[in-house]
Amino acid sequence: MTYKVAAFYQFAALPDHRELREPLRAFCAGLALKGSVLLAQEGVNGTVAGAPEAIDAFTDELAHGDMFGGRLDNLELKFSTAAAMPFRRLKVRLKKEIVTLGDAAADPTKNVGTYVDAAEWNALIAAPDTLLLDTRNAFEVAMGTFEGAVDPGIKSFGQFKDFAADQLDPAKHRRIAMFCTGGIRCEKASAHLLARGFAEVYHLKGGILRYLEEVPETQSRWRGECFVFDERVALGHALRELDKGHSRGE
């Protein structure tokens, strides 16, 4: 059996997120899904895997079902496949933030950077006045990144605001293009930089995964592999599942 994997998120007001946890967990369990879903007052974030028809039923419920009442009408959603189930169990957790930055001023529902589609990304990052910034953790960057990208050298995303305070200057860095795995960290990071007075902040819509899915390998400026937070370890162009030995550099 080939499993279908759905990675998804949306920043949306969910003041009832605590009450949503058990219905969502029960719905996922009924579909025999495994993976992780985070619920917070600011939205939802997760990756789950299961039979293709089960994943389709799940994503349809998120976007159109009664559970969320149409509040997830702009869900960022990406699909890939796995030869074996990439998760060991199902977890639905309550969090303060669906991606932890720790900056109350960074609210993607109010102010966020300019989205750039995968097809337009190469032109943006090739411009000489663009600072290309990888917002992921250092071990992720080590597995693969875009040519010329700055590595913040952080161990967790919560350290990004310290990097920005120490290394980035609104007067010097007039145009910043940032990217992350699926797009969610860039939503928070771009909101943070805008709140600090940076003029032009762009981010790759759908993240590296969308870029690898849509941009032909012959035109790609991506080098290496894209780490994913499940037992597949890494994905390549066209979101191909990579051999685990290859992913470890063996």
Image (cartoon, helix red, strand yellow):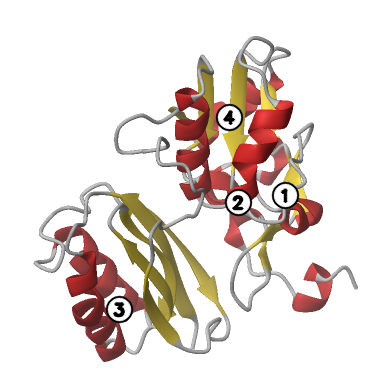
Residue visible at 60% across and 34% down in the picture: 178
- SS at mark 4 in the image: helix
Give the Cα separation between the discs numbered 4 and 3: 33 Å
Q: Secondary structure at mark 1?
A: loop
Please rate how many residues cluster around mark 3, counting C-alpha atoms within 10 Å: few if below 14, some from 14 to 19, many from 20: few
- Percent of width and height locating residue 214: 53, 45
Q: Which amino acid is tagged 2?
A: Phe
Quote the CA–CA distance across marks 1 and 2. 7 Å
Q: Earlier in the sequence, mark 1 or mark 4?
A: 4
Furthest-top residue in this view = 171
Which of the two discs, 2 and 4, labels the residue nearer the N terminus?
4
Circle number at residue 157: 2
The amino acid type of the residue labelled 4 equals: Trp
Specify the amino acid type for callout 3. Glu
Q: Is residue 215 above or below residue 51?
A: above
Separation of residues labelled 1 and 4 (CA atoms) = 24 Å
In the rendered view, tell whether residue 84 sits above or below residue 157.
below
- The residue at which mark 1 appears reads as 154
Of circles 4 and 3, which is in front? 4
Residue topped by disc 4: 121
Disc 2 to disc 4, how far (Cα)?
A: 23 Å
Q: Looking at the image, is mark 2 or mark 3 earlier in the sequence?
A: 3
The answer to whether residue 134 of the structure is visible from this angle is: no
